[in-house]
Image (cartoon, coloured by chain):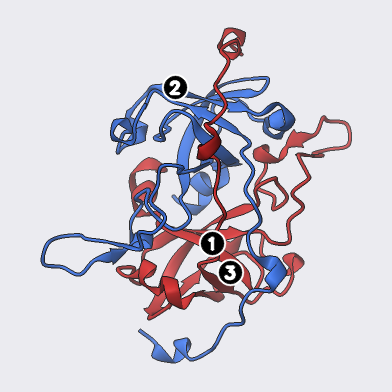
Chain colours: A red, B blue
């Protein structure tokens, strides 16, 4: 702890710099009908999931090919956004939601590492997804560089 | 390519399942005043960044400690959200923004792997950030499990 570092007062972000409205770029079809069905260790589950792009956004996946690992960003539409902390064990203080990877958090943006199995116009089939069927897609980002250099 | 996989028509997400409004949980202070100043390989840049939580959300980081690697989710408030594809080389077709990690995309949510250097009430000091000074914070997620098992 370096208390001195906390004395600096940060400026509030500019009024026009706040997050804008999110766009549903597509829908993620998985075999998990409910949150309870979703795997805790998705990389141990081979079931493919299909990411269906909305027609207006089909071009955003041009260039993605099978074998590419990517981060799938999705909106946890079943999350409780009012939860800020969560218990760990009965006699320990709670931890903040940012110290966990649970789905309940103020901005329920899921980040799942997945691997592309197949691509077709407007559809990307992946393995490794852990969200419920019908989850809104927010973004896809290649993870190869991170996996190969940054996270090793 | 398995064209048959594309024949299934996905249902549109329920009307009430779309992304809700994002909340600015804090502000990320970095040494990069402009996007041009931001490093391409942030893990090669030791400069610390300070994540200042908004007072109402200070508890969401309880339990985070130095040494933890986490994904910092931030809002690219300087991004062009209308860009869907980008050129690669002059004689090749463009790729979709989801085949790149550029900042310009319909939902400009940055995902940066960072390492905690220090924690204090309402402030988390990290290294590895690559966003401009004053970027709105959206979320933090521990990356240890991914780094230790999933991405190795």
* Point 68% across, 20% down: residue: B121
* Residue A13 screen position, x and y as percent: 54, 31
Residue B63 in sight here: no
Name the residue located 66 percent from the left edge and 59 percent from the top edge. A76
Vertical arrangement, residue B95 with respect to residue A53, above or below: above
Circle 2 chain:
B
Q: Nearer the viewer, mark 2 or mark 3?
A: 2
What is the x, y in percent for residue B63? 69, 30
Q: Secondary structure at mark 1?
A: loop
Furthest-left residue in this view: B91
Quick one: B65 or A142, which is closer to the camera? A142
Residue at 36 percent across and 63 percent down: it is: B84
SS state under label 2: strand
Identify the mark at residue A45; answer none if there is no mark.
3
Residue B6 image point, x, y percent: 46, 87
Q: Which chain hosts label 3?
A: A
Circle 1 residues within 10 Å: few <14, some 14–19, many ≥20: some
Is B49 displayed left or right of B1 in the figure?
A: right
Mark 2 highlights which residue?
B48
Q: Quadrant of the C terminus of chain A?
A: top left
Q: Is residue A119 something one can see in this rendering?
A: yes
Residue at the far right in the pictured view? A90
Label 1 sits on residue:
A23
Q: Quadrant of residue A38?
A: bottom right
Mark 3–mark 1 distance (CA, rounded to whole Å): 29 Å
Structural distance between the alpha carbons of marks 2 and 3: 37 Å
Quick one: SS at disc 3? loop
- Say yes or no: labels 2 and 3 on the same chain: no
A51 up-or-down from B22: above or below? below
């Amino acid at each position: 702890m370096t208390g001195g570092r906390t004395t600096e007062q940060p400026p509030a972000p500019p009024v026009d710099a706040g997050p804008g409205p999110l766009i549903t770029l597509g829908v993620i079809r998985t075999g998990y009908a409910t949150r309870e069905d979703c795997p805790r260790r998705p990389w141990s589950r081979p079931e493919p999931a299909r990411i269906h792009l909305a027609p207006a956004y089909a071009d955003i996946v041009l260039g993605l090919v099978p074998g590419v690992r990517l981060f799938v960003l999705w909106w946890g539409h079943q999350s409780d956004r009012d939860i800020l902390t969560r218990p760990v064990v009965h006699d320990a203080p709670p931890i903040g939601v940012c110290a966990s990877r649970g789905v309940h958090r103020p901005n329920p943006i899921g980040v799942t590492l997945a691997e592309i199995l197949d691509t077709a116009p407007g559809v990307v089939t992946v393995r490794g997804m852990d969200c419920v069927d019908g989850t809104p897609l927010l973004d896809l980002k290649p993870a190869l560089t991170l996996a190969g250099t940054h996270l090793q």
